[in-house]
Image (cartoon, grey):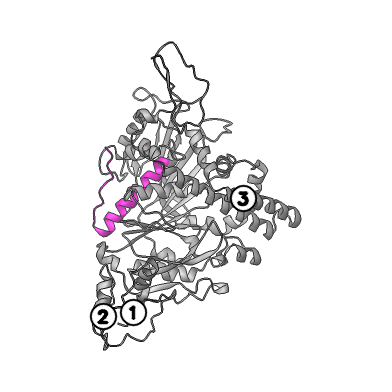
Amino acid sequence: MKAAFLIVPSNATHFSSVSVSKTRATFAVRRTFLRTRKTTRVAALRMANEKLNTQIQEAIKNAEDAAKKYGKASKEAKVAWDFVEELEAERSHQAANKQSEDPLEKYCNEVPEADECRVYED
Amino acid sequence: MVLGFNVAGAVRTTAVRERPPVCGVGAQSSRFRGDTMVSVARTRAFLAVPPLRSTRLPKPTRQTWLHMQTSTMQKARYAEKAPRGVHKEAAVGAVKSEALQRKNIQRPVMVGVAADSGAGKSTFLRRVMRMFGSDIPKGHTPQGELITVICLDDWHNRDRQGRKEDNITALDENCQNFDLMAEQLEALKNGFDIMKPIYNHETGRIDPPELVSPNHIVVVEGLHPMYDERVRKLLDFSVYLDLDDEVKIAWKIQRDMAERGHTLEAILASIEARKPDFERFILPQRQYADAVIQVKPTELIPEDKERKILKVRLLQREGVQGFKTAYLFDEGSTIEWIPCGRRLTCSYPGIKFHYGPESFYGADFSTIEVDGEFAKLEELVYIESHLSNTGTKYYGELTQLMLAAQNTPGAYNGTALFQTIIALKIREIYEQLTGRKVDPVVRS
């Protein structure tokens, strides 16, 4: 039978238009990128705790308000910016930990030249 | 030795030493190991009244297990030192830890790592942890087979709310319970378990303490490892990660502006606000470090704004026991080296090395500097073959370790190179001080 198969890996973050040929029974394997360094990093950050993100937004707002109210060099402003720094550090730690749990990442760290680990930059 | 556990199985959260002994037990050994259930059952046999069949001892839950393990703890001397009594449950072991025997620990080697947040501390710690075993159990305090990493933020004596009320930052010396920190770290170094308080960075509160046992290598990392003299004396080796202001801004932009809602003004304001406390409390620790990794903007590209290429300097203190400083070609001389040329082709802007003696805060240091980026395997191997005293156990280990951590930030410049060298040096120092051997992590 004439059919064209399209194989798209489930964790592909985006796929562009794919040509599907109906006249030939071919595997139209689209070498979509399984992951790029940039998307993995951004995806990990997005997957990080949403609650933490909103906390950081609030903390930045508080810090800017405190700086406006008490002055940039005041103790209140320093403490408020310290909270922002602490939350941002926690978020990046969580994102880094989550990233290292991915078995694909771990495998690619060991064997960077494997087929699954090919990186395509747009 | 007084037994302090409750045979009926009720769990108390604080374990104090002064408890009346269970009747009829006598001088039973109080060292709990895997056969706790057996020893408890054995104890019941000594009771005057034989146990009823219906009253079975409950299977030890984690809390009970911790309770049994911690029953040989005594309240820490400085547990009441913190305001609002946040550290009142901190404890220190009364007998030597069973981990010493179980893991065959000769003496714990303590390493201090000082850096402000966002300076590459966690990347560096991950490299060190990988050097001593790849599977470290996750948890607030990673405690693996060979290495334990303790965050010094756990000894904050005020939670976030408390700091807000008292208007002090986490960098302030008054915000740390240095007495308890010194007491517990000294106990840990001498082979006792500790019940260390936990500071939860996500909620900003101080959680109930956790059990930390001594280990072959104990890394204490945070803002003030070298601030207090008592803690400084315990450290066998100390590292300080130093960043120039421009690099600090660039890294913060990379870390935080990827997420929506962060403006450049917010980042600059945050760094400016942090500066006075940083210069007062963190920077002075630099003079006590045995190794300093300084990250500066590159000198190879004029008017560089991206800060992708960095100049990294490794300063190594001379005369530290067990620490053989790494060098280029000829130890003690001054060398300028550009490896790119006929044998090695590098991409723009190339690589430039410097090695030489230096006087840092009045002490003798040897400095290795590298400016540029190396992404190709050939460059790494070429550089490794010319560096000496790096602490590698086989030719190519440095390259392999750097390749294994390719996806970490700074993997292609001097930060990765020097962090890996210091991690290797920590392994070497451990071997020198204890006489043991650590197997290198070989990848197929």
Residue B344 % position (x, y):
36, 25
Q: What is the chain letter for disc 3?
A: A
Q: What is the chain letter for disc 1?
A: B
The answer to whether residue A42 is above or below residue B216 is above
Q: Is residue A99 magenta?
A: no
Along the line of sight, which residue is nearer the eye, B57 or A117? B57
Q: CA distance from mark 3 to mark 1?
A: 48 Å
Q: Nearer the viewer, mark 3 or mark 1?
A: 1
Q: What is the chain letter for disc 2?
A: B
The answer to whether residue A31 is above or below residue B202 is above
User: Is residue B309 visible in this depiction of the protein?
Assistant: no
Q: Helix or strand or loop: what does disc 3 sit on?
A: helix
- Give the crowd class for mark 2: few <14, some 14-19, many >=20 residues within 10 Å: some
The answer to whether residue B206 is above or below residue B298 is below
Residue assigned mark 2: B43
The residue that appears at 27% across and 54% down in the rendered structure is: B431
Range of magenta residues = B416-444
Residue assigned mark 1: B7
Residue assigned mark 3: A56
Q: CA distance from mark 2 to mark 1?
A: 9 Å
Q: Amino acid at mark 3?
A: Ile
